[in-house]
Image (cartoon, coloured by chain):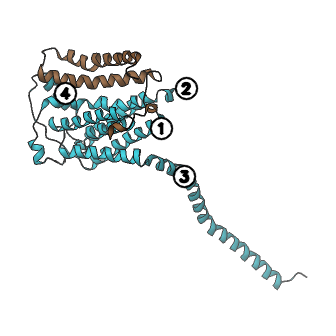
Chain colours: A cyan, B brown
Amino acid sequence: MKNENWFARNVEPIMSIALLAMWVFGYFVVGKLIAADHSFYSLATTADRRLPFVPYFVYPYVALYPVFLLPFFLVRDREFFKVFGWSYVTVMIACYLVFWNFPVAVERPTFAVVDFTTWALNLVYKLDVPANCFPSMHAAMSMMAALTVFTIDHRRGVWVIFVTLMIGLSALLVKQHYIADILAGFGIAILTYHAYFRQRIHEAIAEDLRRVPRRIDQAFEDALERRLEPLIDRKIEEKLQDLLAKVEAARRNPPK
Amino acid sequence: MLHARRPDRNKIVNWDRNKVSWLIYHFLVGEIIAVYALWLEEFFIAAPSPIWLKVTLTTSVFPACCAAGSVWLYKKGWLR
């Protein structure tokens, strides 16, 4: 432990802050950029319209932030830590790509701020852009955290999955998302979990990356050979022609 | 069979190995519990206390007590 550098000793808090910053920064940057476009899709269904607006569900909705950070401080194993770190990054990038290419906005209800609950919900509405809905990052990130915890401890994992399902439900009842957003968010998290934790996709990617320098060397050599071969051939041909001409000249005018 | 698998203790932070991670983890758990407790309080009682008091209790005081309580429970041998 004493030989580890500062980063290695503090990798958990550093990574948690970095990924939280990446999430929040990316979310708002993409939201601002697509908000300028003003062309949003709506995924509202009859079921969405029938769901009531319940401001009380703002409490499970904000529980996402501690849930997001939980695995960083629960997991000790460094290899496992890397795997779930990469899975977080993958979920974020997948969500941002969908936000960018398929912007969905949600219609929010208007309400009066009369008590602590409505004050809290009003704060959430003010801070969060009404865009970036499909897929729900609340659903995706919380499910990713829950599956990570579940992998190392089923008992804790079941509790976090319960909290995650409540987050999904709350996102619907405070009218921050449509049903399709929540399902897509859970779907992305489950697929990413399967790819990283079951199929060990990061190991295959790492193996491919290790081969990259060798492949670059090979490609460089091939390209060089293709370029130089005709040049060398032409030079040799010129030399041969020159030599043949000299031989011919020597044959016609032999030295006396 | 969810109960059939034991937790992988080698992969879970414990007080002896990393005290800071242990404290932050239990602070976060306390934060989640506090949010749910506040939900119940607002739904059933809705005490007319100032906003800053509820925010401070939920985001700092209760989670900090949970973190401190987790250390006490660990020392008692209940959270090992």
Give x and y (percent) for residue A60: 21, 30
Instruction: Please check whether the numbered discs 2 and 1 fall on a single chain.
Output: yes
- The circle drawn on residue A79 is 1
At x 49% / y 47%, what residue is drawn?
A206
Pointers 3 and 2 within a single chain:
yes
Q: Kindly identify the residue that appears in the image at 39 percent across and 48 percent down.
A: A195
**Crowdedness of circle 4 by 10 Å Cα count: few (<14), some, many (20+)?**
few
Q: Could you say whether the residue bearing mark 4 is in a helix, strand or loop? A: helix
Nearest to the eye among marks 3 and 4: give it.
3
Counting residues from the start of the chain, the first of labels 1 and 4 encountered is 1
- In this image, A96 relative to B18: left or right? left
3D distance between C-alphas at marks 3 and 2: 31 Å
Residue hosting label 2: A1
State the CA–CA distance, disc 3 to disc 4: 50 Å
Residue, disc 4: A123
The residue lying at 17 percent from left, 29 percent from top is A121
- The 10 Å Cα crowd at callout 1, few under 14, some 14 to 19, many 20 or more, is few
Nearest to N terminus: mark 1 or mark 3: 1
* Mark 2 and mark 1 residues within 8 Å of each other at the beta carbon: no
Q: Is residue A170 visible?
A: yes
Judge whether residue A126 can be spotted in this image.
Answer: no
**Label 2: how many Cα within 10 Å (few below 14, some 14–19, many 20+):** few
Question: Which of the 4 quarters of the picture holds residue A106?
Answer: top left
From the image, which quarter does the N terminus of chain A lie in?
A: top right
Residue at 40% of width from left, 47% of height from top? Answer: A198
Q: Are marks 3 and 4 in contact (CB under 8 Å)?
A: no
User: In terms of image quadrants, where is residue A149?
Assistant: top left
What kind of element bears circle 2? loop
